[in-house]
Image (spheres, rainbow, N blue to C red):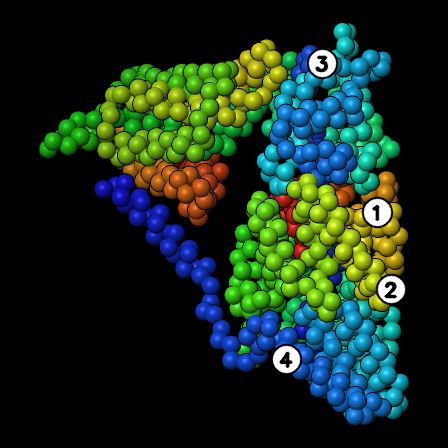
Amino acid sequence: MRWLCLLLLMLFGSAAEAHLTPNSEVRLDLGQHEAIADIIIPLGDYAAATGNPTNNSAAALAQARRYLTDHIAFRAPDGRPWTFAIDTIAFAQIQGPPDLHAVARLVPPPGAPARHLIIDWRAIIDAVPGHFALFVLGSDFGGGKLGEDRHVLGAVQGARHRLVVDRGDTSLLHGFGAAFLLGMRHIAEGHDHLLFLIALLLPAPLLASATDGRRRWTALRPWRSTLWHLAGIVSAFTIGHSLTLIGAASFDWSLPARPVEMLIALSILISAVHVLRPIFPGREAVVAGGFGLVHGLAFATIVGHFGLGAQEKALTILGFNLGIETVQLLVVAAVLPSFLLLAPTRWFGAVRVGGGVLAMVAATAWLVERWLGQANIVGALLERGFAQSLWLIAVLTVVGIIARRRMISKPAA
Amino acid sequence: MLLLLAGLVVAAIGVVVDRWHASPPAPRYSYGPRNFGDALELAQHDVLSGMDRVARAPGDWINQEVYARGLMGRARLTGSFDDLATARAALDRGMRDAPRGAGPVLLDAVNLMSLHRQKPVPRDLDLFEGQAVPPGPADLSESIAIRGDVAFYSGRYAQAMQAYRAAEKLDAGPGAQMRIANWDRKMGRFDAALARLDRALAGPRPPTRQFTATVLLQKGLTELGRGRWDEAAALFDEAEAIFPDHWLTAAYRAQMIAAKGDLPGAERAYAAILKRSTPAMPMPEVMDALAALLRARGDVKGSRSWAARAGAIWDRRMAQLPEAAVGHAVEHELALGAPARALALARANWRARPYGDSALLLGLALRANGDPAGAVRLMQALERTGWRGAPQYVLLSEALAMLGRAEESEAARADATAINPRAFDPSASLLWFGNH
């Protein structure tokens, strides 16, 4: 009777299944004096609701524009209408089935708040039963939300076509604070940026010299010179990434993400080789500044689209950059004691080579990962390990203290 | 030199990991039909043989059972409700004509389950287990497993698992494994479900091509449940390679073409499947899938035409075997028809089988009819039963958003994406088969 069970299961295999039905989605970005609505309406439901053509001819787009302006209204709490101007409109297949995609600029009437509005939405929902429009908040600088993720505001369907959005009081400080925290989080979680910096700092207490025609790390750099050297590397990296971050985020410079990410991995690889064998001794600051330009491009992709208006944009970039610098300085402050303590001891050679090999393996793994566009196990394992790097720093510091105490108590004969 | 070394280390680790995950060697198939055409021919033969036996001695219940079994076997391939209804009639006759304490009771229970009429099933199983000659371990295991099915489709999941485990103790064959896999999948335990499906194939007897393909489709559905579309597509392709030409496999593959964004390609694939449609194999599910795809592309006229054809078949099936058809009719009405009708049908479906999938359909119908509060209550109750699928949280999130409960909506959204990172992917609306 065993076949019976299979038969039964096969028949059940065609059991009724719940399907997701497409819905409209509107993303609102709220600024100090205006808002942007990014509107996505499933093309099929638009066609079913209106009977209008769905190609990108001027006539079809004009009809779509007219339909939206006739079926969507934004009002101030006192009932006065907001200006609703559609900037762009197109039928496009961005992700999933094709949509009607429109971006509209919304301006409140004079004296009305920009973060308190009433949405009266009848597009599609008045004609296609069951269809609903979901409203999400993208960015709200004054509310301390930059738009790195979205928050649900509400949804309308059928006869429920009004939605009240009230985001309360506003302050530019909230947005600045959010940008600062985002910068901190980004650099703290972006192990590649920090690994590049640490790889450049690792041989900083050493001086290179050539023996047998080959350059090696041989002598110890004087303590004071080491500090200046470290400050130079960190400052050059800061200047480098700040320049491109400000430039790219302010003027919408953009490069494809993959080459930028690959260049970052390459920068780590070169620094890692330098840790093992000096290839640009004394010019670490120049390298830090040069590759810093590339790292800044990657930072800019995070904040480039945040903030409506010049003031918000400037505060976002400033906050984000300060957040990055803060974490960067904290990391330097954390690793510096261990490097300085260990540098004169016999342990430093092992730490330097171990660190260099680790950075080299990580850089190679990231390079392969970013080139192929596919995660690999080595990168994943290293990321997991880097998340615990504070422990490693603590251990190195303790080892440094012990080694130095031994050196002091047993002076060389 | 050092660069080369680092590259070698990464490459070596990659090779080791690849070997670690390498698939086991493919089994050899020494018996069973080689493809859908062979299987259908075999099923036709079984039906004709059963018809012949019934024609010679209609009062012999064993002949009626053989005939019903043949019809159900063919229905499994074609999805024909006519065959299921005829099998039902043959079993009714066989049960009526059988002496007291005998009859086609186990097949009757299977047929009733496949028609979603589960109330009379325990009576059949009592009869089967109480026969003068006690059933062997394999048959007894099957009977217990069907009791588990009754519990599962009544929403008593713990009791269902208890029965499945008891059945597995008697006979750890593929039937028990696949049921447990289904249970695991519905509770969001995808890895466990996949492991069970592998065990279903690893029995002492080598599996047939047809069974292997069925298991691969189930594995694909499991991967879909957690948003691994590429893995699912590969499994559907493998099912096609092992047991070619099955229209349902072709439909699964067509939806994956759509999900990848090639809507014209998916339309061609669905149209090719529907060219094989006949009155005996009408494929209304595929018609619905094509109608939904055409609608998504803005071809309202084409969509309505296919939806009307599918709707006529569902109407006929509703008249024929309402409990078995109602769930599909709900889907049809929700996606392509009238929400009000969908709600009435969803309530009937819930009454017939008050379990997770029915709850989800009813919840969707409530939301589509402007009752998001009802949908929220239903989904929260479903969550308390242990049922875990991304669609229930998608619905919960949407319904909560409609009620203005934004924070809770966000939490439900996070629950959905934790189960299936692609739960809100717009392309998910193009997955017609198995996206639940």
- The crowd level at tag 2 (other Cα within 10 Å; few <14, some 14-19, many 20+) is few
Residue type, numbered disc 1: Ala
Which chain does the residue under circle 3 lie in? A
Q: Residue at x 46, y 20 (%)?
A: A253
- The crowd level at tag 4 (other Cα within 10 Å; few <14, some 14-19, many 20+) is some
Q: Which mark is residue B319?
A: 2
Which chain does the residue under circle 4 lie in? B
Residue A358 visible in the displayed image: no
Q: Residue at x 39, y 52 (%)?
A: B14
Residue type, numbered disc 3: Val
What's the CA distance linking mark 1 and mark 4? 40 Å
- Say yes or no: labels 1 and 4 on the same chain: yes
Secondary structure of the residue carrying tag 4 is helix
What's the CA distance linking mark 2 and mark 1? 18 Å
Pick whichever of labels 4 and 2 is earlier in the sequence: 4
- Say yes or no: labels 4 and 3 on the same chain: no
Which chain does the residue under circle 2 lie in? B
Q: Residue at x 34, y 52 (%)?
A: B12
